[in-house]
């Protein structure tokens, strides 16, 4: 409990929490970006 209090109340903890949230958000963004399938199939490109 003390660690969570320090994470959300001190300046250094808030910077760390912001960095963690930013990295998780980037991970979700890139996962969705790379999983999207809007490229044409290889057979259609060969024609």
Image (tube, rainbow, N blue to C red):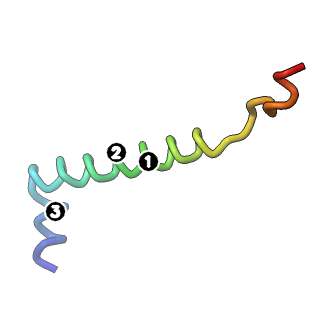
Cα–Cα gap, marks 2 and 1: 9 Å
41 and 11: which is toward the camera: 41
Residue 1 location, quadrant: bottom left
Q: Residues within 10 Å of mark 1 (few under 14, many from 20)?
A: few
Q: Residues within 10 Å of mark 3 (few under 14, many from 20)?
A: some
Report which residue position mark 3 lands on.
7
Mark 2, secondary structure of its residue = helix
Cα–Cα gap, marks 2 and 3: 15 Å
Q: Nearer the viewer, mark 2 or mark 1?
A: 1
Report which residue position mark 1 lands on.
27
Q: Residue furthest front?
A: 46
Residue depicted at x 28% and y 52%: 20
Q: x%, y% of residue 44?
A: 87, 27
27 and 12: which is toward the camera: 27
Report which residue position mark 2 lands on.
22
Q: x%, y% of residue 27?
A: 44, 48
Q: Residues within 10 Å of mark 2 (few under 14, many from 20)?
A: few
Above or below 44: residue 27: below
Q: Earlier in the sequence, mark 2 or mark 1?
A: 2
Q: Is residue 34 left or right of residue 20?
A: right
Q: Is residue 37 left or right of residue 30?
A: right
């Amino acid at each position: 409990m003390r660690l969570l209090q320090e994470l959300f109340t001190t300046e250094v903890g808030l910077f760390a929490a912001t960095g963690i949230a930013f990295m998780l958000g980037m991970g979700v963004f890139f996962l969705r970006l790379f999983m999207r399938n809007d490229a044409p199939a290889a057979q259609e490109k060969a024609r």
